């Protein structure tokens, strides 16, 4: 450790940490990230005209924290032209223009149609704010459902990385709100980043240069002699730095473990926040012509080992141009993901590919590459009755030297919630530094 005291240390290089670093880029800043790359769960790899996607991929359109940053970095988003509400049911793919038509187009019994319609009306009323969400679970909001209807909504709800009984009603409404409109926070997650979600992290790495210290696992951050002493391990050695301010932009339990001097109610709240797993398989294909899935972006699968299927080549199918090949992804959350964590990636790939081929037989012979990614701490979600007021009280109080930033400031974690929290923490850092100067 040298005598130098940095203005701020940002701990964590996901969307929250990258947003905080962007807003503080003119200061003496150090960003510490445990992985050998920035981006957190935003992870993609280029493959010719396409990209292999292995994590988060839906970016906010319009005015948002994320759009402000990526536009300033010279990155471009691409509109999603295909259906985001397609459904595989009984081995057949349905893509009606309006999701509200499903009770009438699916081959169901009268009892199932009525149950699906009623559940849809409850969802629509909650998403549009006509009815405040109850404090119970998403399962309680939907009510008892026939098995096949439950399978549809359960697969869709696992996008939150939790079962319907585990997530609060507000989480489920936020999830469906992002699909049907502007969501609970007024931001529609409706575009992709051209070149893959990892492009944001690559641009930030180039901007920060050596100020981003990768492979740095932070052990602790605590006040010493009027500054924050940050201890971390990198390449098998312990290193230290001092900073006037610290932003903890890591998952909530990790933040509680690093900052031992947080008030006890805040530390307890952070340690108790729940994260669910998700497991995905990115697939590069090699077809040479039009395929049945070209006009689909997202598909819920009610009878597969995965819950959702994505076509990341769809936004590029515009203007009559269609390069050979494509990029697909299978996603499993909640209980299926937890089970997948226990088996080998090769077996996961075989199981997911088998279900993909069952639904889209023309994929047979057109698979070029498959890569499986496990995210044990995949996404954060609010549990029924969970109280996070201690976090908000702490974040809003003046005079702090340690600030919190993460997607856990929303009912359902996403990159815009995380980036907004990072921007807010950066603003508080500036305020505290100006007060001290």
Image: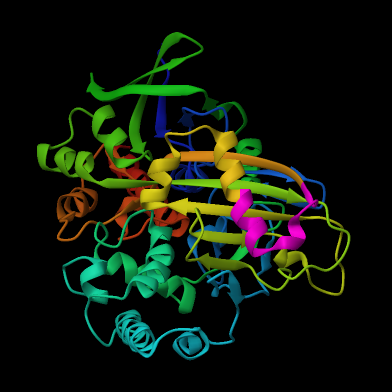
**Is residue 135 or residue 36 the one in the foreground?**
135
Whether residue 128 sits left or right of residue 265 in the image: it is: right
Query: In the image, is residue 364 part of the stretch drawn in magenta?
Result: yes
Is the residue 58 above or below the residue 255 in the image?
below
Identify the main secondary structure in magenta: helix
**Which residue occupies 56% across, 27% down?**
36
- Residue drawn at (32%, 81%), measured in percent from left and top? 119
Give the residue at the far top of this rendering: 237
**How many numbered marks are there?**
0
The residue lying furthest to the left in this view is 264
Front-most of residues 9 and 225 = 9
Measuring from the top left, give residue 8's x and y in whole percent.
Answer: 40, 33
Colour mode of the rendering: rainbow
Residue 58 location (% of width, % of height): 55, 61
- Asked whether residue 181 appears in the rendered view, the answer is no
Q: Nearer the viewer, residue 361 or 406?
A: 361
State which quadrant residue 164 falls in. Answer: bottom left
Residue 275 sits above or below residue 85 on the image: above
User: In the rendered structure, does residue 312 fall within the stretch colored magenta?
Assistant: no
Q: Quadrant of the C terminus?
A: top left
- Residue 282 placement, left or right of 265: right
**Which stretch appears magenta?**
353-367
Q: Nearer the viewer, residue 370 or 313?
A: 370
Task: Identify the residue at horizontal 13%, vertical 37% (top origin).
Answer: 263
Q: Is residue 51 above or below residue 174?
A: above
Give how far across and how far down residue 413 sits, in percent. 38, 55
The answer, for residue 128, to whether it is visible in the render is yes
Q: Quadrant of the N terminus?
A: top left
Residue 364 pos. (x, y %):
76, 54
């Amino acid at each position: 450790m040298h005598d130098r005291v940095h203005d701020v240390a940002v701990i964590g290089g996901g969307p929250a940490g990258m947003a905080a670093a962007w807003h503080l880029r003119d200061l003496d800043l150090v960003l510490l990230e445990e992985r050998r790359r920035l981006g957190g769960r935003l992870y993609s790899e280029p493959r010719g005209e396409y990209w292999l996607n292995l994590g988060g991929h839906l970016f906010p359109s319009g005015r948002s924290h994320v759009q402000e940053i990526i536009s300033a970095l010279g990155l471009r988003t691409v509109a999603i032209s295909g259906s985001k509400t397609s459904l595989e049911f009984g081995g057949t793919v349905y893509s009606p223009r309006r999701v509200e038509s499903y009770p009438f187009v699916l081959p169901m019994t009268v009892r199932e149609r009525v149950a699906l319609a009623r559940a849809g009306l409850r969802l629509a009323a909650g998403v549009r704010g006509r009815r405040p969400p109850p404090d119970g679970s998403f399962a309680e909001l939907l009510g008892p459902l026939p098995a096949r209807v439950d399978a549809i909504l359960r697969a869709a709800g696992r996008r939150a990385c939790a079962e319907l009984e585990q997530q609060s009603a507000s989480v489920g409404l936020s999830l469906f709100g992002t699909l049907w409109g502007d969501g609970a926070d007024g931001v529609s997650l409706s575009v992709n980043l051209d070149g893959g979600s990892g492009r944001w992290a690559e641009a930030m790495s180039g901007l920060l240069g050596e100020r981003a210290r990768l492979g740095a696992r932070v052990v602790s951050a605590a006040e010493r002699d009027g500054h924050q002493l940050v201890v971390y391990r990198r390449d098998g050695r312990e290193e230290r730095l001092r900073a006037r301010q610290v932003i903890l932009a890591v998952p909530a339990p990790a933040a509680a473990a690093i900052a031992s001097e947080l008030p006890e109610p805040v530390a307890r709240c952070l340690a108790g926040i729940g994260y669910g797993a998700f497991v995905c398989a990115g697939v590069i294909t090699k077809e040479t012509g039009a395929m049945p899935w070209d006009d689909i972006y997202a598909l819920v699968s009610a009878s597969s080992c995965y819950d959702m299927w994505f076509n990341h080549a769809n936004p590029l199918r515009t203007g009559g141009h269609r390069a050979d090949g494509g990029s697909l992804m299978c996603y499993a959350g909640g209980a299926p993901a937890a089970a997948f964590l226990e088996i080998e990636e090769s077996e996961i790939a075989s199981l997911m590919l088998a279900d993909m081929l069952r639904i889209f037989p023309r994929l047979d012979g057109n698979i070029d590459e498959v890569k499986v990614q496990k995210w044990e701490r995949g996404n954060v979600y609010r549990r029924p009755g969970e109280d996070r007021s201690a976090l908000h009280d702490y974040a809003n109080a003046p005079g702090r030297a340690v600030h919190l930033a993460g997607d856990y400031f929303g009912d359902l974690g996403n990159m815009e919630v995380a980036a907004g929290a990072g921007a807010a923490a950066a603003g508080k850092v500036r305020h505290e530094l100006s007060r001290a100067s």
